[in-house]
Amino acid sequence: MATTFAASLLVSGVAGAQSFQLLEATIDDVHAALTSRRITCRVLVQRYLDRIEAYDEAGPALNTIQFVNPGALREAESLDSAFVASGLVGPLHCIPVLLKDQVETRDMPTTYGSALFAGFVSGRDATIVVRMQAAGAIVLAKTNMGEFASRYVGSAFGAIRNAYDPTRNPSGSSGGTGSGIAANFGMVGIGEDTGGSIRGPAAVHSLVGLRPTVPLVSRHGMMPANSSSDTLGPMARTVKDAAILLEVLAGYDPHDPVTAYATGQVPDSYVAGLAADGLQGTRLGVIREPMDPKTDPESDDYRQVRAVVDRAIADLQALGAVVVDPVVVPNLVSVQETYVGNNFETEQAMNAYLAEHPDAPIKTVRAILLSGTVTPWRARGLMNVVGKSTDDPGYLRILQARERLRRGVLTVMADHELDALVYATFDHQTTVIAQDALTNADTEDAYARGNNRYLSPVIGFPALTVPAGFTTDGLPVGLEFLGRPFTEAVLLRLGYAYEQGTQRREPPATTPALGDQP
């Protein structure tokens, strides 16, 4: 009987799929379509695979995907059978996930964006992979990333391209996840954020990107960069999808002891508090001071971004928020210097991680550099960490600078009774990919100009980027909310209310619905 019903579900799913709108579909949309037999999990996954084939290497050639899961369709069929037997297996049932290739999967390669690790299979799943799969998710593909978690190019794959303008960079280092989710190659994605690598790609791709408080999400099974600020988090097209994914990811993991700090800090639900009137009565402080010394307020693209952000601030007020504009954060000018100056953690952390893998082709940062394989820009960055450690006196100065900034932010929020701070993720548009981006250690591509992402990782507080709209030449702008530690539920509530009240996201024109699909 069950087999007959499963066959019926498959047939009706194939037929009903003609009425299912894949482009911009949400988790709720998929679960509703499965329940009403308008689609099957297998058909859904195949349609995402079709889009990857059509647009990632061909079409605009976004180059977002490093490795497609060869077992994805088989996993989808298993989920269809489970659905017939008992319904949804979890909150991510049949949700295709794009996973940054910095995160381990036991049966797929993990390259960290480097040709040095081509074909390397660690044999274990990261904690977040275990949790997502238990919730019913399918890791559809591993996404390209900036080599060893920096920028948007790597020796393993070349350059990732922005889905809205393939001549421009996708931000990084989670650029493959950002461009892929924006282009509807998957439903939700995982990025890693050391200094902005979730929020940057989200901002330039009209996405929602959440950098959680560091102890909230386990990093076990992820190659580190700066372990005190490394974190994994959701990237999605809607705030609710990001909240659903965070509920699966968050919580204590004994394999990553820092997550013990999250005990008692995780709400029963991040979704339950989402409300269209969630901005009513809240107090938001606007940071207008640039955090990047290279920001140019006289430039045309700065003015374009500022116009979008000013409209967003007006929208926040119209939706019920009390806006304090501007607020001045003490020592804010030191944010970039403090972040960039912390090169004391990387070598120790990467070497310790590689030591966990006896079969890894490379075992140390020094060996990575001596290989001569790493792209020149990334090699230059890694040279700056060799020989440094957290025992160096300079590390103490970094910790002191962090504490001054942390205290300054909390003081401003207390003085003005603020629920969150608000600012542009970038004060400038994303820039054109330089022709020598893969070969020149000093390439002049103005990458990340106007970068305001460092405040969150330097002080360890959560930050959420949401789509604010587009500049006059069609490039996305991100609006960022920053809150106190473990206030992800507050940030998601604010972001959801803003999203519902403005509906600023639009999919890229470069990757429309395929001809035979609605």
Image (tube, helix red, strand yellow):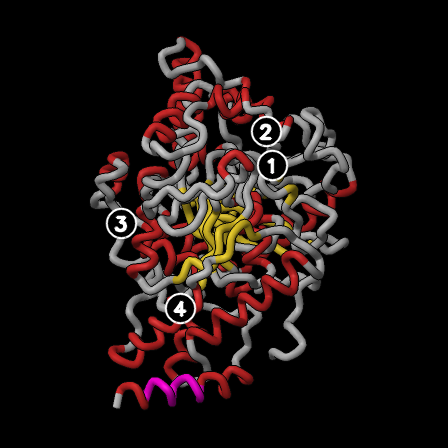
- Residue at the top extreme of this rendering: 393
Asked if residue 479 shows in the view, the reply is no
Residue 155 numbered mark, or none = 1
Asked if residue 449 shows in the view, the reply is yes
The answer to whether residue 385 is left or right of residue 128 is right
Q: What element carries label 2?
A: loop
How many residues crowd around disc 1 within 10 Å: few (fewer than 14), some, or many (20 or more)? many
* Callouts 2 and 3 close, C-beta under 8 Å: no
Residue 43 point in image, percent of width and height: 48, 76
Residue highlighted by disc 4: 74
Q: Is mark 1 on a helix, strand or loop?
A: loop
* Callouts 1 and 3 close, C-beta under 8 Å: no
Asked if residue 14 is among those painted magenta in the image, a careful observer would answer no
The residue closer to the viewer here, 344 or 490, is 344
Q: Which of marks 1 and 3 is nearer the N terminus?
A: 1
The residue closer to the viewer here, 513 or 463, is 513
Residue 123 point in image, percent of width and height: 34, 45
Residue highlighted by disc 3: 266
How many residues crowd around disc 2 within 10 Å: few (fewer than 14), some, or many (20 or more)? some
Q: Which of marks 2 and 3 is nearer the N terminus?
A: 3
Alpha-carbon distance for marks 1 and 3? 39 Å
Alpha-carbon distance for marks 2 and 4? 36 Å
The residue closer to the viewer here, 274 or 269, is 269
How many residues crowd around disc 4 within 10 Å: few (fewer than 14), some, or many (20 or more)? few
Principal SS element in the magenta part? Answer: helix
* Callouts 2 and 1 close, C-beta under 8 Å: yes
Q: What stretch is highlighted in magenta?
A: 5-12
Asked if residue 7 is among those painted magenta in the image, a careful observer would answer yes
Residue 373 numbered mark, or none = 2
Q: Earlier in the sequence, mark 1 or mark 4?
A: 4
How many residues crowd around disc 3 within 10 Å: few (fewer than 14), some, or many (20 or more)? some
